[in-house]
Amino acid sequence: MDHINEDISELLAGFDKERVLSINKIPQSGSIRIYYRILTEPKSYIATYGSNIKENFSFIQFSRHFKMKNCPVPEIYAVNTQGTLYIQEDFGDISLLNCLEQEGPTDHVFNLFRQSLKELAHLQIQGDQGLDYDNWTLTSSEFGKQAIMSDLLYFKYYFLDTLQLPYDKEKLVADFETFSSGLGNVEHKYFMFRDFQSRNIMIKKEKVHFIDFQGGMKGALQYDLASMLWQAKAELSEEWKKDLLEFYMDCVEEELGVPFKKELFVEQYHGYVLIRIMQVLGAYGFRGLFERKAHFLVSIPLGLKNLRSFLRQYNIGKNIPEFERMLNLIVEDDIIERFIPPRANADTPLVVHINSFSFRKSIPPDITGNGGGFVFDCRAILNPGRREEFKTKTGRDREVMDFLEQQTKMPEYMNSVFDLVDISVEDYIRRGFKNLMVNFGCTGGQHRSVYAADSLGRHLKNKFGVTVEINHVEQTSKDWKN
């Protein structure tokens, strides 16, 4: 990782001799892969680094195969000999979800959804032909009963069990078996994207492009449709869901070249909507409750409300009483409210004062007279200041941030900080307290403490909407520029 820019430049030089203007890391979301945007004089590329070689192989093979089938996927330009780094086509930064959030449910966005579903049907059906599922898939080659059971158990272990609600384990697993057996047998099985949602559809020059399909396998057409139309964050209207479902079935019929049983397709589709919602809640639980990633924690209420909306409209239609009982239980208001933190408003008096400082000097005094608060020692984290290239930079410079996030235990450290400070902030908001002080110290007050202070500030603003005042003591005194 120390020489990633050099490795990218060397790989790029194998097919593009243009001068490289910049190589910049793209902020990560839920993925462990690291993306970089390469800018040259005439164009741009995306470089992807991932230590999971099998995952990289799946994406590369799928991409090359689908490209030959005229599907809107990125072209793969080069792969290093280790299989850990590859350069692909750049589709820009605007996703279909971005368009929906910025424009709302406009005709323009609706047409982009239609275009996405048309291309999806083509990729699923035409892309299935000649695809080597046995050797290219990352996990299972087919999404059948066993894979469906895995998703249901994933939901049970990482979400349902965390709620500590009483249930009959044997009856629930038996219901899972019944449910998965029914859905495992569907008439139409082709390529299944596995995570087909609007954030994985990029918009460039009014055309849709697909990314993040390395987890694909052979499976029911309905799964990807359910993933897109029932994405919790998209919150599509029932009218849009109905119209897009009808449009997609027409596209499938066109790709197949023969009529198919739409009534049966819709019946099975509803089952796959439920499976997809279960899988997503399991992922939210694992990423949010176990890995403590804030983005996934705040998504849990959206996922539960999405499930509640589904249960109120559709009958599951199978004899699965314990499963159905638990589903109805977890969408009750008191369960959803467990995951909704208190939000500050215009009348909330709390101000969180966050400082970074140097232990060579002294802990900043509490000017509010309130006393208490937190002092966190960051000196156990590997010090960027020992590296020559970082000596003139601070924890606000991108290179230092990348180093702390990728090569130290700072992410784990900050997750623990979030857990502790969140307890106080929630309590202080509810009780109407005015001040909370949090201090981060390191050796020089230049790198680790600065990064930590900014990181906590962002977290508290995003999660609670609370007023945050950040003071970097050493940065201010030395007038560092970032």
Image (tube, grey):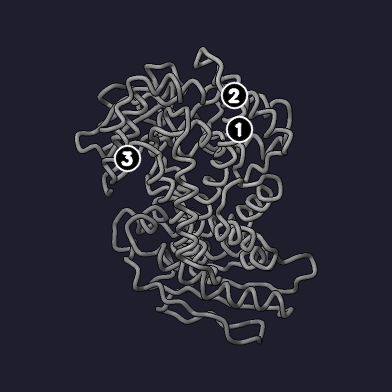
Q: Are marks 1 and 3 in contact (CB under 8 Å)?
A: no
- Residue in front for this viewpoint, 208 or 242: 242
Upstream in the sequence, badge 2 or badge 3?
A: 3
Residue linked to disc 2: 249
**Residue 185 picture quarter:** top left
- Amino acid tagged 1: Val
Instruction: Please tell me the numbered disc located at residue 266.
Output: 1
Instruction: Judge whether 429 appears above or below 11 on screen.
Output: below
Residue 84 visible in the displayed image: yes
**Residue 291 picture quarter:** bottom left
- Residue in front for this viewpoint, 34 or 115: 115
Q: Are marks 2 and 1 in contact (CB under 8 Å)?
A: yes
- Report the Cα–Cα distance between label 1 and label 3: 29 Å
Instruction: Judge whether 247 appears above or below 257 on screen.
Output: below
Q: Position of residue 127 (x, y in %)?
A: 40, 22
- Report the Cα–Cα distance between label 2 and label 1: 9 Å
Q: Position of residue 395 (x, y in %)?
A: 44, 60
Residue extending furthest left? 81
- Amino acid tagged 2: Met
Q: Position of residue 444 (x, y in %)?
A: 40, 70
- Amino acid tagged 3: Leu
- Report the Cα–Cα distance between label 2 and label 3: 28 Å
Residue 23 visible in the displayed image: no
